[in-house]
Image (cartoon, helix red, strand yellow):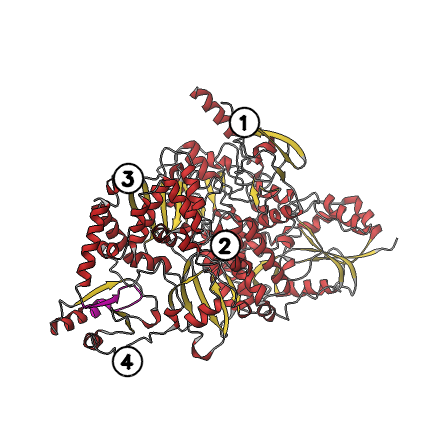
C-alpha cells in the first residue's frame, strides 16, 4: 500500500483538535503505517509541501495570514478536511463577529483590568473583521464538526480516507461535541 | 328607509343636479394637490360672474390621470382640464358655454381615456364621494335593491355566473367563496373588507374608497345578505386618512338612511359595519393575519386549513373580500352576470383596475377589461416611456410579483397568463422600468421590502429572505460568485415552497422572474477574482 | 355520535386515526419519526418551523404534518430527497440567524437544534452567519434569557399563555428583528406577570432559556412534563 502524504494546519483554534489527534494514543502507530506526516505543528517542518494527499485544518480563518496559509494548503492538497467547529462554523473565534475585531481587541486589552492596558502594536496578526469557517474561502472536501471531534472520529475518518473512501456524514460527532 | 323612499330621494337629487347648466368636477384625491384652494378660487370666480344658480362645483374622487393633475372636468361639455391652478379659475369659468381653453384642455381623443373600460371606476371622478345622494342619483345601491328581491342563494348564483374572481391578488372565484361561507355552519357569521393595500406604488383600493365609498358598502351589504352575516369589518390602513374619513362618513350616512343597522330597508336584514385601522404591517393584508389583527392580536398568519370561510374571525365562518371585489358586486347584480361575463377572457372575467407608475408618461389609475395586452396598457394608455428611453420590463403584482420583459408585451393581462410568465395579477400595481433601470437594484428593493415585512413566524421567510437579501447585495456590489448564484436559486426555491403564507411563498418571485428573463445581468455581476479555482 | 376512524398510508404503512387527528400524531403513534421544532405535545400547534412538512399524493404543495388533519385514503410521504433537502436548509438557516456556538452553550448536548443537525446530517452551515448583536437578560433571580440562542419557536410564549395563563412572554418587532420580550419589554426580573414557574425554561428547545447556577452537564430540560400536567388537570376537571 502506498503511503498517503498527510499535512495538518493550525489556524485560529485552541489546538484542541490536534490534541484529539494525539489522543489516538498507541493507534498513532496504525496511522503512521498509513500516512506520512509531511507537514504539521506536531512535526518539524517550516513550509507547506508541494503535494499533500490530505490536509486536516483546525481553526477559523481570522487573519490575512490565515487566508494565505489556507489558500496555499488548498492548492497543494488533494483533499482538504475542516476539522473541528472553528474550521467548520467559526465557533469561539467567531464570537467576535457580532461586534467586530476592533471591539474585541478593546475588550481584551483595554477594558479588562490589567497592569498596562494597551493593544499590542506588534506580535498580533492583522485580524480580519470576521472570523469565518474555511468553506467561505476554499472548497472543503469533508467537514468533521466537534469541539474537539473525538479521537475515534478522526481515526475513523483517516482510516476511511486511507482505504480510498471519503466518509460522509453521519460521522459520530456533532457541533459542540 | 324603504327602497321606494330612497329611489324617490335619488330622483329628486337628480332633478336638482339637472337644474345646473354646468358642472365643474374637481378631483379631490390625495394625489391632486392644492384642490381646496382651487375650489375656493372657482367658487369666487363663479360668484363674481353671478353664475351660482347655473354652475355647480363638486369635489370628486380620482379621475385617473394623476400625471396631469389637478384635473377639473366640465360637464355636460365633457371637457377635461389639466394642471389647473387656482389662478386658472377665471379661465375655466369663462370658458363655460363658450369654447374650451386650449391651453388647459386635455385632448379629448387621448388614448388614456379612450382605451379604458370603466366599471368599478365608472363613478369615480363623477360624483361627490361624501354625498349619499350623489351616489343614489347616479344609480348607486340599485344592485342592493335588486338583490333584496332575490333569495340569498340566487344572489350567490349570479356572482358565480359572472365569473368574478378575487381582486386582492390570488384570484379565487368570489361566488365559490360566498357559497362556502353561506353553507358553513356557525352561530354567527362575519364579513370583512380587506382594505389593507400595502404594495408599494399601488393605490387602486385607496382611490375606490376615496371616490366611491358607498360602492364598497353596497357590495358588503349584498354579500352579508347572501352569506347571512350580521357584522362586518373594514380593515383599512391608517396611512389612508382621507379614505378612512370618507368611509366613516359613508357608514354614518348609510346607517342614517337605514342601509345599515337593523331591519335594512325595512326587511329582515341586520348588518353593522365597523372600521378597524391597520398599524402599518404589510402582512396584515394576508387574510388570516388580518383576522388575528381584528381580534386584537399580533398580525401573524395562521396555517390554512381551516380556511376563514369555515373558521375565521373568533372561530366563526368569515367572508373576506378585497375592496375592488366588493365594488364589482353592485354593478353585477344591477346589470346582470351576463353583462359582466361578456367582458374579459375565458377564465378572467370583467375589468381590472391598475395603478400605473414608474417610468411611464401617464402615471395614474386605469381600468381595462381583462385580456388587454401589456403593450396596450404601457404604450397606448400609459403613453409609453418618457425621455426617449426604451421599455425594459413591467413589474406586476407588487413586491411579490414578477418582472415581465419586452418580448412578452403582447401577453394579455389575466390571472393565468401573468402566472405563466412567472408573475402574478396581485392587487393591481404596475411598475414600468426603462432601459436605465438595473434589475438587480429593483429586485433588491422588493426583497428588502419582503424581508422587512415578514412577520417572522416561519423560518424560511424570516431567515431566507434575509439571506437572499445578502446575496443580492453581493451581486449589487459585484462580489458575488457562481456559488452565490446557485445558492440564490436554492434559497428562492426553499422560500417559495416551504413558507407558511402567501407573503413568503411569493417573496422570491421578483428574483425568480429576473433570473428567468434577465439572467445575464446576474452573470455580468459575478466577480472574476472570487472564483474558487482552488483545487490542485 | 362517535368520531369516525379514517385509514391512510404513511410511508407505505397502512395506519388509522380519528378524523380530528393530525398527520404528525398518527405518524408518531406508528413510530414514524417526522422532525419537529416548534411543535410540542401539550401546546397548540403553530405550523411555523416547517420542518414537519410532508408530501401528500395528488398535491403539488408540501403540508405541515402538525396542523394537517388526516383524510380517508390519504397517501403521505414523510421522507424524500426533496423534503430532506428543505429540512436541512431550514436548520442551516436557523444556525445562520443568531449566534449558535454550541461549544460554549449551556444547552450543549441537550439541545433540540443540535439534535436536528445530527439527525439531518448538517455538518456545516452553507449560509454566512448574520452574527447579530443580541442581549442576554439575566435580571431574573433564577432564570436567564439569552437571545443569541433563541430560534423563535414560540414554545415559551405558548406555554406561558396557554398553560400557566400568565402571558408574560410575547414577541416584539417582526421578521428577522423579532425578539421575545417579557410584558411590555421589561427586564424579566421586573416582570409583574411572571409567576416564576419556569415552564418556559423547561420547554425551550435550546439554550435561550435556562436556569442559573447549573453547569452544562446538569442542564436537563423536562419537556415531557406537559402531557403529564395536562392529564392531571383533565382528571381534576372531571
Circle 1/circle 4 CB separation < 8 Å: no
Q: CA distance from mark 1 to mark 2?
A: 38 Å
- Give the Cα separation between the discs numbered 2 and 3: 35 Å
- Of C134 and B473, the residue lying toward us: B473
- Residue B462 rendering spot, x and y as whole percentages: 50, 51
Q: Residue under mark 2: which chain is it in? A: B
Looking at the rendered structure, which numbered label has been put on residue C4? Answer: 1
Note whether C117 is above or below A59 in the view shown: above
Point out the stretch of residues depicted in magenta: B21-39
Occupied quadrant, residue B349:
bottom left
Front residue of A36/B459: it is B459
Q: Which mark is residue B270?
A: 3
Give the label on residue B398, or none. Answer: none
Mark carried by residue B103: 4
Q: Residue beneath label 2, please?
A: B347
* Structural crowding at the residue carrying mark 4, measured as other residues with C-alpha within 10 Å and reported as few (<14), some (14–19) or many (≥20): few
Q: Are marks 3 and 4 in contact (CB under 8 Å)?
A: no
Q: Are marks 3 and 4 on the same chain?
A: yes
| Quarter of the image that includes the C terminus of chain B | bottom right
Residue B428 at least partly seen = yes
Relative side of B319 to C94, left or right: left
Q: In this view of the protein, which residue sits in the foreground, B126 or A115?
A: B126
- Label 4 close to label 2 by CB (< 8 Å): no
Amino acid at each position: 500500500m502506498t503511503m498517503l502524504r498527510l499535512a495538518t494546519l493550525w489556524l485560529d483554534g485552541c489546538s484542541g483538535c490536534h490534541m484529539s489527534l494525539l489522543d489516538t494514543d498507541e493507534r498513532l502507530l496504525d496511522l503512521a503505517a498509513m500516512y506520512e506526516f509531511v507537514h504539521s505543528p506536531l512535526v518539524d517542518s517550516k513550509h507547506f509541501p508541494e503535494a499533500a494527499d490530505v490536509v486536516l485544518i483546525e481553526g477559523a480563518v481570522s487573519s490575512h495570514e490565515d487566508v494565505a496559509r489556507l489558500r496555499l494548503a488548498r492548492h497543494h492538497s488533494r483533499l482538504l478536511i475542516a476539522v473541528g467547529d472553528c474550521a467548520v462554523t467559526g465557533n469561539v473565534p467567531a464570537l467576535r463577529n457580532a461586534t467586530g475585531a476592533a471591539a474585541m481587541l478593546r475588550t481584551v486589552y483595554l477594558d479588562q483590568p490589567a497592569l498596562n492596558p494597551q493593544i499590542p502594536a506588534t506580535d498580533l496578526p492583522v485580524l480580519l473583521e470576521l472570523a469565518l469557517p474555511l468553506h467561505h474561502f476554499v472548497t472543503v472536501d469533508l467537514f468533521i464538526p466537534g469541539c474537539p471531534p473525538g479521537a475515534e472520529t478522526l481515526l475513523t475518518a483517516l482510516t476511511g480516507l486511507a482505504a480510498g473512501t471519503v466518509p460522509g456524514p453521519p460521522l459520530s460527532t456533532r457541533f459542540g461535541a | 328607509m324603504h327602497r321606494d323612499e330612497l329611489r324617490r330621494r335619488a330622483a329628486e337629487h337628480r332633478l336638482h343636479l339637472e337644474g345646473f347648466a354646468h358642472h365643474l368636477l374637481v378631483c379631490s384625491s390625495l394625489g391632486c394637490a392644492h384642490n381646496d384652494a382651487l375650489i375656493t378660487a372657482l367658487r369666487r370666480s363663479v360668484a363674481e360672474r353671478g353664475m351660482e344658480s347655473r354652475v355647480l362645483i363638486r369635489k370628486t374622487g380620482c379621475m385617473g390621470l394623476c400625471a396631469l393633475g389637478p384635473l377639473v372636468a366640465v360637464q355636460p361639455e365633457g371637457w377635461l382640464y389639466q394642471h389647473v391652478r387656482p389662478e386658472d379659475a377665471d379661465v375655466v369659468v369663462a370658458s363655460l358655454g363658450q369654447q374650451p381653453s386650449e391651453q388647459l384642455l386635455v385632448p379629448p381623443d387621448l388614448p388614456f381615456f379612450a382605451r379604458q373600460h370603466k366599471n368599478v371606476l365608472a363613478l369615480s371622478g363623477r360624483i361627490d364621494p361624501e354625498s349619499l345622494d350623489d351616489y343614489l342619483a347616479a344609480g348607486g345601491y340599485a344592485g342592493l335593491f335588486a338583490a333584496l328581491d332575490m333569495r340569498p342563494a340566487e344572489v350567490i348564483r349570479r356572482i358565480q355566473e359572472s365569473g368574478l374572481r378575487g381582486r386582492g391578488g390570488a384570484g379565487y372565484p368570489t361566488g365559490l367563496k360566498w357559497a362556502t361561507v353561506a353553507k358553513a355552519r356557525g352561530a354567527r357569521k362575519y364579513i370583512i373588507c380587506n382594505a389593507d393595500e400595502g404594495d408599494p406604488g399601488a393605490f387602486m383600493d385607496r382611490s375606490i374608497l376615496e371616490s366611491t365609498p358607498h360602492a364598497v358598502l353596497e357590495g358588503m351589504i349584498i354579500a352579508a345578505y347572501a352569506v347571512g352575516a350580521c357584522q362586518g369589518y373594514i380593515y383599512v390602513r391608517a396611512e389612508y386618512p382621507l379614505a378612512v374619513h370618507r368611509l366613516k362618513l359613508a357608514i354614518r350616512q348609510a346607517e342614517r338612511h337605514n342601509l345599515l343597522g337593523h331591519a335594512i330597508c325595512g326587511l329582515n336584514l341586520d348588518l353593522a359595519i365597523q372600521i378597524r385601522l391597520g398599524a402599518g404591517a404589510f402582512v396584515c393584508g394576508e387574510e388570516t393575519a388580518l383576522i388575528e389583527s381584528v381580534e386584537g392580536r399580533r398580525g401573524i398568519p395562521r396555517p390554512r386549513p381551516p380556511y376563514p370561510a369555515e373558521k375565521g374571525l373568533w372561530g366563526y365562518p368569515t367572508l373576506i373580500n378585497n375592496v375592488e371585489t366588493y365594488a364589482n358586486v353592485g354593478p353585477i347584480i344591477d346589470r346582470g352576470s351576463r353583462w359582466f361575463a361578456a367582458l374579459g377572457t375565458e377564465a378572467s372575467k370583467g375589468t381590472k383596475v391598475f395603478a400605473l407608475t414608474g417610468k411611464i408618461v401617464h402615471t395614474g389609475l386605469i381600468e381595462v377589461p381583462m385580456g388587454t395586452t401589456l403593450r396596450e396598457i404601457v404604450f397606448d394608455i400609459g403613453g409609453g416611456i418618457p425621455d426617449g428611453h426604451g421599455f425594459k420590463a413591467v413589474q406586476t403584482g407588487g413586491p411579490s410579483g414578477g418582472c415581465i420583459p419586452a418580448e412578452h408585451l403582447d401577453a394579455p393581462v389575466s390571472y393565468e397568463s401573468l402566472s405563466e410568465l412567472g408573475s402574478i395579477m396581485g392587487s393591481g400595481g404596475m411598475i414600468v422600468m426603462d432601459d436605465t433601470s438595473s434589475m438587480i437594484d429593483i429586485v433588491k428593493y422588493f426583497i428588502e421590502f419582503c424581508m422587512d415585512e415578514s412577520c417572522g413566524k416561519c423560518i424560511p421567510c424570516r431567515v431566507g429572505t434575509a439571506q437572499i437579501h445578502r446575496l443580492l447585495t453581493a451581486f449589487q456590489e459585484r462580489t458575488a460568485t457562481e456559488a452565490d448564484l446557485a445558492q440564490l436559486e436554492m434559497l428562492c426555491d426553499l422560500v417559495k415552497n416551504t413558507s407558511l403564507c402567501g407573503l413568503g411563498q411569493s417573496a422570491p418571485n421578483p428574483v425568480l422572474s429576473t433570473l428567468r428573463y434577465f439572467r445575464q445581468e446576474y452573470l455580468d455581476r459575478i466577480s472574476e477574482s472570487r472564483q474558487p479555482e482552488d483545487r490542485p | 355520535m362517535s368520531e369516525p376512524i379514517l385509514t391512510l398510508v404513511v410511508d407505505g404503512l397502512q395506519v388509522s386515526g380519528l378524523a380530528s387527528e393530525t398527520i404528525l400524531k398518527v405518524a408518531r403513534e406508528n413510530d414514524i419519526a417526522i422532525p419537529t421544532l416548534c411543535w410540542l405535545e401539550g401546546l397548540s400547534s403553530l405550523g411555523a418551523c416547517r420542518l414537519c412538512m410532508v408530501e401528500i399524493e395528488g398535491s403539488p404543495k408540501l403540508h405541515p404534518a402538525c396542523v394537517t388533519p388526516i383524510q380517508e385514503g390519504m397517501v403521505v410521504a414523510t421522507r424524500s430527497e426533496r423534503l430532506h433537502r428543505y429540512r436541512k436548509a431550514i436548520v442551516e438557516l436557523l444556525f445562520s440567524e443568531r449566534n449558535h456556538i454550541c461549544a460554549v452553550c449551556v444547552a450543549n448536548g441537550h439541545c433540540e437544534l443540535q439534535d436536528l443537525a445530527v439527525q439531518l446530517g448538517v455538518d456545516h452551515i452553507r449560509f454566512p452567519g448574520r452574527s447579530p448583536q443580541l442581549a442576554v437578560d439575566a435580571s431574573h433571580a433564577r432564570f436567564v434569557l439569552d437571545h443569541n440562542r433563541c430560534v423563535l419557536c414560540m414554545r415559551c410564549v405558548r406555554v406561558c399563555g396557554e398553560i400557566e395563563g400568565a402571558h408574560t412572554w410575547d414577541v416584539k418587532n417582526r421578521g428577522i428583528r423579532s425578539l421575545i420580550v417579557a410584558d411590555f419589554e421589561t427586564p424579566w426580573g421586573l416582570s409583574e406577570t411572571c409567576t416564576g414557574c419556569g415552564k418556559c425554561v423547561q420547554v425551550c428547545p435550546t439554550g435561550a432559556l435556562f436556569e442559573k447556577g447549573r453547569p452544562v452537564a446538569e442542564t436537563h430540560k423536562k419537556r415531557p412534563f406537559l402531557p403529564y400536567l395536562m392529564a392531571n388537570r383533565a382528571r381534576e376537571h372531571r
